[in-house]
Image: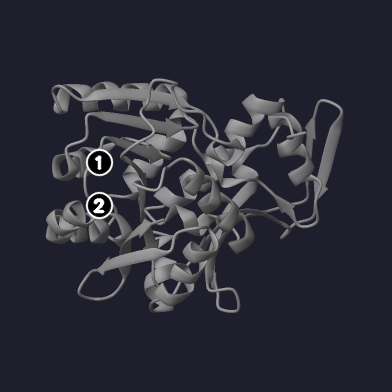
């Protein structure tokens, strides 16, 4: 039986080390902060991916073939979907995101920007399985998962999610997915610890979201943002670090944190392309074609059954 949201959070908080799933970043404020992150000079993934799509969008559309429906997981503001829809010209778009209100607003904007597009919003946690509207045709589906978000999952969980994506399409469908490639550590760490402190605010905001979700009493000022590259696992890690001894309480539970103790909030794996295509093959995608930017910082991969 799947965990409830409350037990999912509290079970993570009592682990040693404590953990919070990155999906809880995305309340209304968190979604806005992440959108601001994508515009920061240090945060290269969004602008690199956008430029890559502008350069190779027509080739990607040809390789994808006839697309009837684009299904974007973790749709956010739907801006990347708007660009993709211009290339593949689907009849229908389905945006899936955990932040329901933010998603509804984004899908409404998409309807206005792409006249004639049947655009739908499905609020839900994709890690718990996506249930599409029953009238969405099974044929010609393209699952779209941009922005290297697959890197937020440990490899076994990434494989589970890729298998779920494979289950959303028939043999004539496909998956278009972004991955962040390994690169200079200084460049990576700056992207997750920007000078303006926007990523720090994004990380800390998860505590206010948890207070609303489980009735906890986190105080943001008692915590600091920490981000660094873990070379052994080829991933950026984000943590919240207690700046003093802290006691955090919630109904029927509590946790004491020593000064310097951390809560692990996010990983962002940086996959070499061969390793990622091997993961796709394990998930049931037998063919993969990749496009990269000129610096080989980022890749957009079209995976087909």
- Measuring 58% from the left and 32% from the top, which residue is drawn there? 209
Residue 247 position, x and y percent, is: 80, 41
Disc 2 to disc 1, C-alpha distance: 7 Å
Q: How many marks?
A: 2
Residue 53 position, x and y percent, is: 20, 56
Q: Which quarter of the rendering shows the C terminus? A: bottom left
Residue lying farthest front? 171
Color encoding of the figure = one colour
- Left or right: residue 61 versus residue 208 is left
Q: Quadrant of residue 100?
A: top left
Neighbour class for label 1 at 10 Å: few (<14), some, many (≥20)?
many
Q: 196 or 104: nearer the eye?
A: 104
Residue lying farthest right? 252
Tell me the residue that label 1 is attached to: 67
Residue 9 position, x and y percent, is: 71, 38
Tell me the residue that label 2 is attached to: 64
Residue 266 makes an appearance in the image: no
Q: 144 or 65: nearer the eye?
A: 65
Residue 270 position, x and y percent, is: 46, 69
Relative to 243, is 87 above or below?
above
Instruction: Name the secondary structure under disc 2.
Output: helix
Instruction: Name the secondary structure under disc 1.
Output: loop
- Measuring 55% from the left and 34% from the top, which residue is drawn there? 125
Relative to 91, is 304 above or below?
below
Relative to 284, is 249 above or below?
above
Neighbour class for label 2 at 10 Å: few (<14), some, many (≥20)?
many
Q: Quadrant of residue 290?
A: bottom left
- Measuring 17% from the left and 22% from the top, which residue is drawn there? 112
> Is mark 2 in CB contact (under 8 Å) with mark 1?
yes
């Amino acid at each position: 039986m799947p965990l409830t949201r409350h037990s999912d959070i509290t079970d993570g908080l009592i682990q040693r080390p404590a953990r919070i799933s990155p999906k809880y970043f995305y309340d209304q404020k968190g979604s806005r902060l992440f959108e601001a992150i994508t515009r920061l000079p240090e945060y290269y993934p969004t602008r690199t991916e956008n430029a890559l799509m502008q350069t190779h969008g027509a080739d990607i559309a040809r390789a994808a073939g006839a697309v009837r429906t684009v299904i974007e997981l973790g749709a956010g503001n739907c801006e990347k979907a708007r660009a993709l829809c211009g290339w593949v010209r689907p009849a229908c778009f389905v945006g899936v995101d955990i932040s329901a209100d933010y998603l509804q607003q984004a899908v409404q904007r998409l309807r206005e920007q792409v006249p004639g597009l049947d655009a739908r919003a499905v609020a839900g946690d994709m890690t718990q399985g996506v249930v599409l509207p029953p009238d969405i045709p099974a044929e010609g589906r393209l699952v779209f998962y941009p922005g290297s978000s697959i890197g937020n999952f440990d490899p076994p969980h990434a494989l589970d999610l890729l298998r779920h994506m494979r289950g959303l399409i028939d043999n004539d469908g496909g998956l278009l997915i972004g991955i962040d490639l390994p690169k200079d550590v200084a460049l990576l760490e700056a992207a997750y610890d920007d000078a303006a402190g926007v990523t720090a605010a994004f990380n800390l905001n998860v505590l206010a979201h948890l207070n609303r979700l489980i009735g906890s009493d986190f105080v943001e000022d008692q915590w600091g943002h920490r981000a660094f590259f873990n070379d052994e696992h080829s991933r950026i890690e984000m943590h919240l670090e207690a700046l003093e001894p802290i006691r955090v309480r919630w109904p029927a539970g509590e946790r004491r944190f020593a000064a310097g103790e951390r809560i692990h909030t996010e990983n962002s794996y940086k996959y070499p392309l061969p390793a990622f295509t091997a993961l796709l093959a394990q998930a049931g995608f037998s063919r993969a074609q990749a496009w990269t930017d000129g610096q080989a910082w980022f890749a957009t991969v079209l995976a087909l059954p």
